[in-house]
Each structure stands twice: as structure tokens, then as C-alpha cells.
């Protein structure tokens, strides 16, 4: 166990480092990315630009800039080029919103994926299965921004069934909070439900043919018990680990499109705005934030796998 | 010497509708099992032996399966026809009155559940006892089948046992509810020969101690010679010969049986120059020859063979020794002598 | 230990070892132990001869076969093929050797590429070794040799039965006219009636082509028919090596005796009359093998010396070797005439068994 933790910590440090370096370099290579020019506003003079450069240290060699920026990330002193606001504060403000979206969607998509995938497997080859397959493919093919925008427009703006975007604090009004999140949850989940239900269907079909399921039936167990304790229990193992990884991604702000379409102002939307303005500090901080979560959840997923599948523990 | 009958299988017929046509896996098979005896069903792949016994427990039920005939489980509470029984009725019989052990112990146990839990699960499904009591019984069962340190091992997972130990766990599990009928489908094929000997010892103890009936499905004639009281030889979905152990081994009537007995290498006899082999291969399940299914591979074929031979006692009408070959018992005895490359029973002594 | 007919041995294996390392460690993997899969094995195989290699799961017979073929690297010891030392030869230097050493696998369903036609499968070794000539003609010839029809070359493996697929595997092995074929459980996945056909085929091919076979099997009855000599392995070591018939009539090492005794005789009367001991327990851990004679924890004849000293491979009459302090079926004269075989493992003691 100690060995596992040590290795994962080292991995985390390496990943976060690589991600930060790559992000930093990318921004310095993008054309039109000179932050001094952008900050100077309209029709800047050369002196103005130079002054900004000196003030912000843009005239320093790249590696020095990198080190200074990284130092700021860890001291919490990082400031956005465009808004001049503290980056870390903004991220912290966005976290509860992103989390609300992520957790709600994750639970929703798991429940539906399991239900639909299981049903599909049980009716394999029949009409219900084919119908659900088509539905799943549609779900996978629909871009989330398109679906979100459509939902927002028709259900939100036109029909007024749901609010037209925006976020309400959980602590302020739980019901309104959920009400505002229903459409984002659905929009984000649709893709995952499509994918996960297919994977589960395939796992369940494989598991149902396993010898130990035949043994369970020969023991005289009820079909329900066989389904839950033998078929589902074993089919879910790979799904749970996949889910952990996707969840990590979404929590880290990977649901950029959904957040933006519904104007939730979470970490993802923050990232989207910053990218659009080629604002390096927030993007750097957020990519590291995402990397951190992905590695963390990767490690949790590995532990979870060992808990669920005792054969893995031997290693 | 009439023992109490446990099972009466009458003209059992199983077919599957597949893309390649109708697969007639079991062709009007009849046999019976009494208390305290071991019936060996012998055959190779495609003979239908596994499908036959799995059908007794309803394990072959599927949308594309077609069943015929009847299989009666005889019990004091009232006989049950296993072929037509409802799922709810079968479920109460499975693992309870009829238990089954499968071939590969590695894949027949659920790898993510502890061994003890899997045994307890079966007990609790059929008997109204407390979990603690079921647990104690599981420990006792593991102990009885020879798993060392049963109390500790009960919390282990299947992959933590070796192949032989896993099979013992399967046996313990099968015996947990004191079944009247135990079906063992190739129980030792996947095991080393010394481990096989241990398992066969256990099965023998079982037969002698518990007064249950055992159906042993196998292709290994050595194992049959060890344990069986009666044998049914299956070929291409049909029983081609049936009788007591001594009858079938020492007075085999069907040419396929001759081939089976002849093509096995005997360690206690001198080496033959060439292994007698049955030429050709078993027919495909979807298309079989008219009449006797063994015709294409039988060197003794004659004019009567295209007519379907019934399973009858030809040697002695009063005995249980039946076979499906039109040749007269005298002709059979003559043709049975072995010559190189022909089917026959390996006679005592080497072949020139 | 020699092939007995004066011919130079085709294969010579001396004190061969193959250990699988077990790695563990916090940051860097360190080897903390070894699985002693093959632990000091010595034997010879002559041209046209068949050596059967038997043992139960975990005895190392498959690992030994693979190491001889250099599919695995020897941890120690030497392998000589046709007089040349191939133990540490490079992959390039091995190419000509590989042409002469071929392998037939156990699983007829997994060892043929399902996407290739039979003709391509059999022709592949010819193309690989640059024998382009008349590949088609050679393939047809090989198919006939193994009892299949030339038309079968254009079909796919799944269209054939297990026995037929194994014949295809044999045809493939014959393509390059090898001198040695290693067969790893070639018939155990087949039905009994088909096993006899394949064994007869292997027998015929050996007569026709002068092939040497190294026949790995767990089934003693199958091995008997094809082998000239048989070696019994237990936990990485050869514990007995004898001419085929003699192994069955005169087993010297108690493990061999137990192995033979465990096989049920397909003859009810003789089975009933037979007296034998059922061996209890399981083969122990190859990571931490028992001291002295590896079989001593399960051996009904074990004494104190068996736990302490590893018995040397003692050579008895007829080239019959056995590693045991308390051998069965040997008379006092035979014991007196016995010598320590050079095939004996280096870790074994020097003392030969004494008449008791």
C-alpha cells in the first residue's frame, strides 16, 4: 500500500508539472498571444507596451516567466491578465457550481445507464434492444452544446418550463437550485448515458454466459439474486472505474461547453472565457487543477478496482 | 436388488434452432438412476451427454430450444416432470434435490465473492436457517471434502485456491443441501491425475455414505471403471449401448463402444504396434446419416443399417444390457477381435 | 544418458535453469524471489528419437520446452543443438536453428490464425525463411502427408474439427523439414478417438522423415505410445528418466509410482484388484521449494535424509535414471552396480542409495 501511494504521488507531481509546462509553452507560441499588447488596450504605443512588459515581467526569458508564474500559483497570488482579479479566488468561487453540475449529472447518468444497459442486455436482439441502441447512438452523436442550446431555447426561453440558464446557490434555495440544474444535468448526461449503457450492455451479455452464472442457476438461486449478485456485480466493475475517470474530468472543469451554454459560471466556464481571451494565468491554474483531479481520481479508481475485484489485489 | 428409483428419463429430446439449421442435440434418450448407484454417461464432444444432464436441471432452456419427452424426479411428495416443470418449481429442486458439479472449477465459481458466501448463499436459498448456522455448516462441509483449515479458508476467494481445492469447494457446495441426485459433468478433466485420484476417492466415499444417486458424465473410461455401476454410451445424440459396468466393458455390443475401448492406451498391457483408432469424425449435429448414426465410420456396416436401430436388449432379453446395433450377438462376438487399424476390443496380449 | 545408438545427440541440455523473477519494491522494482520453474535439468536427445516429458501442472515441463526453443532465456546452463551452443546466441544467429526446430501447440483452436487460410498458415514458414519456390505445391504435399485433402488449403481454420486443426498445425511444423519437433500437449484437447489418429500420424511421420520429438504431456498413457524414453519432472527437476516400457513396468522413484497408480485402468476387474496409495496434498510452492528431495513432504517412504540431502540422479541398468534415496523395484545387485549420473543436479548430494 505504501508503495502504491508513493508511486501515485510521484506520478501526480510529474503530470502536473508536464501539464503546466505544456500549457505555458502553448500560449507563448500562439500568434497574437502577446499579453502586453492585449492589456494595453486600443491603439497602444510602443512605450506603453514596453512599460507593461516590464511591470509584468514579460521581457524576462521564458523559463524565468514560467517559474515566477508557478510561484504565484502556489502562493495564491496569481492574477488574471485581463480582469486583474485573483485567479485562485475565482476558481474557488466556481467550484461549488461545477461540483453541483458534476455530481448531479454523474448520479443521473449512472442510474440511467445501468437501467437502460441492463434492460437492453436482457432483451438482447429484440426490438426493445435495437430501439435503445439507436437511442444511445443518437445520445452519443448529439453535441452537448447543440443539445443544451436547443433545450435552453425551447424549454427555457420559449416555453418557460425551465429557467433560461443561470445558477442559484444551494444554500439560498435548494429547490430553485435543482430547478436551474435540471437541463444542464440532462444535457451533460445524455452523452454519457449513451456510452455507458452500451458498455454495460456488452459486459452484462458477456457475464451472463460465464460459467459461474450457470453454477448460480444450478444452485437454485432466484433470477433476481443471480442478476444482482452475480451478473450485475461483476459487470459493473469496469463501469465503475470508467465512471471515476469521467467524473474526475467533469469535476475538474471539463464540462466547459455545458457550463457555458447554461451560464453556470463554474470553473469550466471560467476556463472557456480565459481561453477565449488568451488569458494565461487562469488557464494555467485550471489545467493544473484538472490534472490534479484526474490523477487523484485515477488513483481512487485503482483502489476501487482492487476493492471490487479481489483478483487484482494480488498485485 | 431393486433400489429405490430417483430419476426416470423417458425419450428426452432436445433441439436448438440455429442459423445453420436445426441442431438435434439429444435424440430420444432414456435412462434411469436409483439410490446409491453411479450411472456413467460416456461420450465424446457432440454426443449430447452434457446437454442431456443440463436439461434435467433446466439449464438449457432458451428461446431457441425445443424439448420433448419427460424426465421424472421421483419423490415422496409427488413426482415432477423436469422437462415441462415451471421455473419456480425447478428453482426449488436445483441445488436442493438435484445438485450439479461442473467441469472447470476455475470459471465455475464467482471470482468476486468469498467461497464461504457462495456456499451459504445456496443453503439460505433452500433452507430456513440463520446465517450463522449456515456458515457453520459450510465450514463442516469444506472440512469433510478435505479442505485444510476450513474455518480460515472459508473467507478466501476462489482464485486463492488451487484447481483441486476449487473442485472440492464445488463438491462441498453441491452437497450443502443434501441432494438425492448429484450430477458431475466431467469433474476431473481439468485436473492433474494425482488430484483426480483424490477427487474420485471423495466421490466414491460420497456414493457409499450418503445413499444419493450420482450421474457421472465423462469421456474418460478409466474414471468410469473406477466409479460406475452402470454405463450409458452416447454417440451423436443417442444412447448406443447401456448396461452394467462389467457388461459393457467385457461384453461390449456396439462397434462404437469397441472403438472407444480399443483406442485407449492401456498402461497395464504391452504396447500395440499401432493404436487402433476409429476413422473419420463424429457427424455434425445439424446433419446426420439416415438410420444408424455410426454408419460412416463403421467397418461392419451391412444392408440393415440404413434402418434406424432401436435400443434393445439383444444379448439377453431379460437383462438391462441394451444396444443399437443390428448385428446378431454371435456376429458381434466374432467381429470384435482386434486387428491393426480396425475397430475392435483390444484383446489381452500385444498385436503382431 | 546417451541416445544409445552411438549417433551424436541432436539436443544436449546441461544443468539448464530458468527462473522467473518476482519483483517488488517501493520506487524501483527489485527481485525479491524467484519461481524455480526449471531447476538444473540435464538430458540428451538423439536424431530420430522421441523423448517424452511428463509431469503435473507446475512441474516446469512447458517452461523447459520453451527455454530449449529459446522462446525464454536460460537463467543458467547450456543448450546445444546439432553440436552448437545456442544458449546465448543472438536472435539472428538463431534463425537457421529455428528452421530445424519447430513447435506444435496444445490448443488447436488458438494456435491457428483465424483470419488466414490454411494454405497461408502452412506456407508462412516457407516464406519467412525465403523458400519461395513452389510454395503451393509444397503446401499441397504437406496436406496430403497429414491426411488432409489438397483442396483444404483454401479454407479457414474454423471450418475444421479439432483433430483436423491439429493436423494443420503438424503440417505447418513440417514445412521447413525440421530435425526436431517440440510438441506441447498436442492431443490433450482432443477427443479420445481422435487422439489415437493423431498419435498414429505422428508415429508415421517420424518413421518417414527421421524426426526427433520432444513430447510434453501430462497424460502418461498418451506419452507411452510415442516415446523411446520418458523423463518425469517434479517441481523443476527431472526425478526419473527411463526407456519407455521400463518406466511403466519398473518405476523406481515413488513419485512415478504414485503417478502411475493414480491413473485409473479402464478395466474394472483389474482396477478393483489393484492396490495403490492415493497421494495426498498438492505440489508445493515453486518459489520456496522444500529442502532436500522436493517430493519428501508427500512421499510415503520419506526419511530424515530425504529432508536434508537432495538425492543425486542415480544411473541404473539400461540408462534408467532416478533421484531417490529409497528407490523402489531395484535389487541389491542393481544398487551395488549403480553410479552417479553426470546429469545429476549440481546441488544434489553424492551419496548413492544403499541397500536397506
Image (spheres, grey):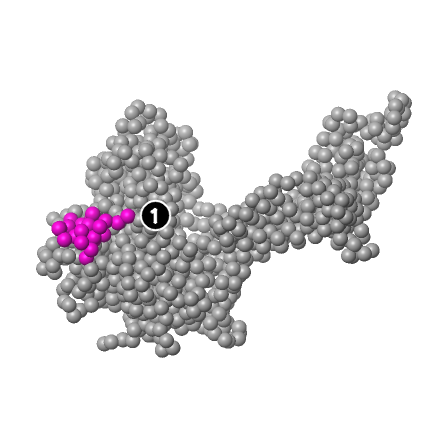
Percent position of residue C293, x then y: 37, 57
Report whether residue A65 is seen.
Answer: yes
The answer to whether residue A185 is left or right of residue A303 is right
Percent position of residue A287, x then y: 72, 40
Viewer-closest of C60 and A142: A142
Tell me the quarter of the picture where residue A140 sits. Answer: top right
> In this rendering, is residue B308 above or below C133?
below
Decide whether residue B54 is among the magenta residues: no
Residue plotted at (13% across, 51% down): B302
The answer to whether residue A119 is left or right of residue C243 is right
Percent position of residue A238, x then y: 56, 50
Tell me the quarter of the picture where residue B264 sits. Answer: bottom left
- Farthest residue toward the top? A46
Tell me the quarter of the picture where residue C250 sits. Answer: bottom left
Q: Which residues are magenta?
A: B287-309
> In this rendering, is residue B216 above or below C169?
below
Chain of the residue under label 1: B
Residue plotted at (45% across, 68% down): B88
Magenta span dominant secondary structure: loop
Viewer-closest of B289 and B163: B289
- Which of the image's four quarters has the N terminus of chain C? top left
> In this rendering, is residue C152 above or below B38?
above
Percent position of residue C104, x then y: 33, 41
Circle 1 crowding by C-alpha within 10 Å: few under 14, some 14–19, many from 20: few
Q: Which residue is mark 1?
A: B21
Residue plotted at (43% across, 59% down): A214
Residue plotted at (39% across, 67% down): B85
Report whether residue C267 is seen.
Answer: no
Viewer-closest of B89 and A161: A161
Element carrying mark 1: strand
Amino acid at each position: 500500500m505504501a508503495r502504491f501511494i508513493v508511486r501515485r504521488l510521484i506520478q501526480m507531481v510529474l503530470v502536473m508539472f508536464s501539464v503546466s509546462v505544456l500549457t505555458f509553452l502553448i500560449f507563448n507560441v500562439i500568434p497574437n498571444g502577446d499579453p502586453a499588447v492585449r492589456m494595453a488596450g486600443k491603439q497602444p504605443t510602443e512605450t506603453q507596451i514596453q512599460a507593461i512588459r516590464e511591470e509584468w515581467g514579460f521581457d524576462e526569458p521564458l523559463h524565468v516567466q514560467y517559474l515566477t508564474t508557478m510561484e504565484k500559483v502556489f502562493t495564491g497570488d496569481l492574477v488574471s491578465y485581463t480582469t486583474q482579479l485573483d485567479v485562485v479566488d475565482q476558481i474557488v468561487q466556481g467550484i461549488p457550481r461545477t461540483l453541483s453540475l458534476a455530481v448531479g449529472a454523474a448520479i443521473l447518468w449512472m442510474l440511467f445507464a445501468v437501467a437502460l444497459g441492463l434492460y437492453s442486455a436482457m432483451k438482447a436482439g429484440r426490438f426493445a434492444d435495437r430501439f435503445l441502441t439507436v437511442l444511445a447512438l443518437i445520445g452519443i452523436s448529439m453535441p452537448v452544446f447543440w443539445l443544451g442550446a436547443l433545450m435552453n431555447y425551447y424549454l427555457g426561453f420559449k416555453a418557460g418550463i425551465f429557467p433560461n440558464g443561470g445558477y442559484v446557490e444551494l444554500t439560498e434555495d435548494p429547490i430553485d437550485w435543482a430547478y436551474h440544474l435540471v437541463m444542464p444535468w440532462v444535457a451533460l448526461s445524455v452523452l454519457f448515458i449513451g456510452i455507458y449503457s452500451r458498455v454495460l450492455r456488452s459486459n452484462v451479455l458477456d457475464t451472463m454466459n460465464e460459467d459461474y452464472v450457470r453454477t448460480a442457476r444450478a444452485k437454485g438461486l432466484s433470477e433476481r439474486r443471480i442478476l444482482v449478485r452475480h451478473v450485475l456485480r461483476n459487470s459493473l466493475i469496469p463501469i465503475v472505474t470508467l465512471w471515476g475517470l469521467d467524473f474526475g474530468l467533469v469535476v475538474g472543469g471539463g464540462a466547459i461547453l455545458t457550463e457555458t451554454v447554461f451560464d453556470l459560471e463554474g470553473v469550466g466556464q471560467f476556463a472557456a472565457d480565459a481561453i477565449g481571451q488568451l488569458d494565461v494565468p487562469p488557464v494555467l491554474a485550471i489545467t493544473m487543477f484538472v490534472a490534479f483531479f484526474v490523477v487523484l481520481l485515477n488513483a481512487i479508481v485503482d483502489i476501487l478496482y482492487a476493492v471490487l475485484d479481489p483478483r487484482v489485489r494480488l498485485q | 436388488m431393486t433400489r429405490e428409483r430417483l430419476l426416470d428419463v423417458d425419450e428426452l429430446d432436445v433441439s436448438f434452432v440455429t442459423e445453420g439449421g436445426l441442431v438435434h442435440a439429444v435424440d430420444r434418450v432414456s435412462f434411469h438412476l436409483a439410490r446409491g448407484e453411479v450411472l456413467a454417461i460416456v461420450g465424446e464432444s457432440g454426443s449430447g451427454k452434457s446437454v442431456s444432464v443440463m436439461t434435467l436441471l433446466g439449464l438449457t432452456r432458451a428461446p431457441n430450444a425445443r424439448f420433448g419427452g419427460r424426465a421424472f424426479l421421483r419423490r415422496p411428495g409427488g413426482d415432477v416432470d423436469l422437462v415441462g416443470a415451471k421455473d419456480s418449481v425447478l428453482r426449488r429442486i436445483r441445488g436442493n434435490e438435484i445438485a450439479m458439479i461442473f467441469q472447470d472449477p476455475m470459471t465455475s465459481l464467482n471470482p468476486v465473492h468469498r467461497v464461504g458466501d457462495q456456499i451459504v448463499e445456496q443453503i439460505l436459498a433452500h433452507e430456513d436457517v440463520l446465517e450463522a448456522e449456515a456458515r457453520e455448516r459450510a465450514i463442516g462441509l469444506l472440512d469433510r471434502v478435505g479442505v485444510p483449515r476450513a474455518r480460515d479458508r472459508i473467507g478466501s476467494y476462489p482464485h486463492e485456491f488451487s484447481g483441486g481445492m476449487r473442485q472440492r469447494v464445488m463438491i462441498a457446495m453441491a452437497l450443502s443441501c443434501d441432494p438425492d441426485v448429484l450430477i458431475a459433468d466431467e469433474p476431473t478433466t481439468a485436473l492433474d491425475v494425482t488430484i483426480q485420484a483424490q477427487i474420485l476417492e471423495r466421490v466414491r466415499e460420497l456414493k457409499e455414505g450418503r445413499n444419493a444417486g450420482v450421474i457421472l458424465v465423462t469421456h474418460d473410461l478409466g474414471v468410469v471403471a473406477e466409479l460406475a455401476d452402470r454405463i450409458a454410451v452416447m454417440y451423436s445424440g443417442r444412447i448406443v449401448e447401456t448396461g452394467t459396468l462389467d457388461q459393457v466393458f467385457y461384453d461390449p455390443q456396439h462397434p462404437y463402444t469397441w472403438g472407444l475401448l480399443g483406442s485407449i492406451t492401456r498402461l497395464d498391457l504391452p504396447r500395440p504396434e499401432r493404436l487402433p483408432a476409429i476413422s473419420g469424425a463424429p457427424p455434425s449435429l445439424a446433419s446426420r446419416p439416415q438410420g444408424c448414426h455410426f454408419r460412416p465410420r463403421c467397418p461392419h456396416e451391412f444392408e440393415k443399417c440404413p434402418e434406424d436401430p432401436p435400443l434393445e436388449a439383444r444379448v439377453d432379453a431379460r437383462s438391462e444390457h441394451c444396444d443399437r446395433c443390428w448385428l446378431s450377438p454371435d456376429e458381434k462376438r466374432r467381429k470384435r477381435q482386434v486387428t491393426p487399424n480396425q475397430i475392435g476390443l483390444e484383446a489381452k496380449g500385444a498385436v503382431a | 544418458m546417451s541416445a544409445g545408438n552411438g549417433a551424436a545427440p541432436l539436443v544436449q541440455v546441461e544443468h539448464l535453469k530458468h527462473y522467473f523473477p518476482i519483483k517488488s519494491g517501493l520506487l524501483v522494482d527489485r527481485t525479491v524471489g524467484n519461481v524455480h520453474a526449471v531447476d538444473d535439468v540435464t538430458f540428451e536427445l538423439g536424431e530420430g528419437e522421441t523423448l517424452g516429458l511428463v509431469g503435473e501442472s507446475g512441474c516446469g515441463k512447458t517452461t523447459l520446452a520453451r527455454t530449449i526453443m529459446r522462446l525464454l532465456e536460460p537463467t543458467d546452463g547450456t543448450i546445444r543443438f546439432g553440436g552448437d551452443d545456442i544458449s546465448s546466441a543472438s536472435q539472428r544467429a538463431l534463425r537457421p536453428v529455428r528452421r530445424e526446430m519447430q513447435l506444435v501447440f496444445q490448443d488447436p483452436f488458438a494456435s491457428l490464425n483465424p483470419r488466414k487460410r490454411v494454405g497461408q498458415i502452412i506456407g508462412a514458414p516457407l516464406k519467412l525463411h525465403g523458400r519461395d519456390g513452389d510454395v503451393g505445391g509444397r503446401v499441397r504435399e504437406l496436406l496430403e502427408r497429414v491426411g488432409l485433402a489438397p483442396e483444404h488449403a483454401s479454407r479457414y481454420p474454423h471450418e475444421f474439427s479439432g483433430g483436423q486443426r491439429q493436423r494443420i498445425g503438424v503440417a505447418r511444423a513440417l514445412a521447413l523439414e525440421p530435425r526436431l519437433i517440440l510438441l506441447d500437449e498436442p492431443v490433450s484437447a482432443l477427443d479420445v478417438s481422435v487422439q489415437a489418429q493423431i498419435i498414429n500420424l505422428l508415429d508415421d511421420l517420424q518413421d518417414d522423415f527421421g524426426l526427433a520429438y520432444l513430447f510434453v504431456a501430462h497424460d502418461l498413457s498418451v506419452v507411452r505410445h510415442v516415446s523411446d524414453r520418458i523423463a518425469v519432472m517434479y517441481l523443476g527437476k527431472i526425478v526419473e528418466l527411463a526407456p519407455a516400457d521400463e518406466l511403466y513396468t519398473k518405476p523406481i522413484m515413488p513419485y512415478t509410482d504414485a503417478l502411475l497408480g493414480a491413473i485409473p485402468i479402464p478395466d474394472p476387474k483389474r482396477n478393483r484388484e489393484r492396490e495403490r496409495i492415493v497421494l495426498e496434498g498438492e505440489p508445493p510452492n515453486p518459489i520456496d521449494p522444500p529442502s532436500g528431495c522436493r517430493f519428501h513432504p508427500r512421499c510415503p517412504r520419506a526419511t530424515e535424509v530425504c529432508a536434508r540431502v537432495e538425492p543425486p540422479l542415480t544411473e541404473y541398468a539400461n540408462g534408467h535414471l532416478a533421484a531417490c534415496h529409497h528407490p523402489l523395484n531395484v535389487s541389491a545387485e542393481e544398487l551395488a552396480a549403480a553410479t552417479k549420473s553426470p546429469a545429476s543436479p549440481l546441488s544434489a548430494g553424492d551419496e548413492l542409495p544403499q541397500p536397506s
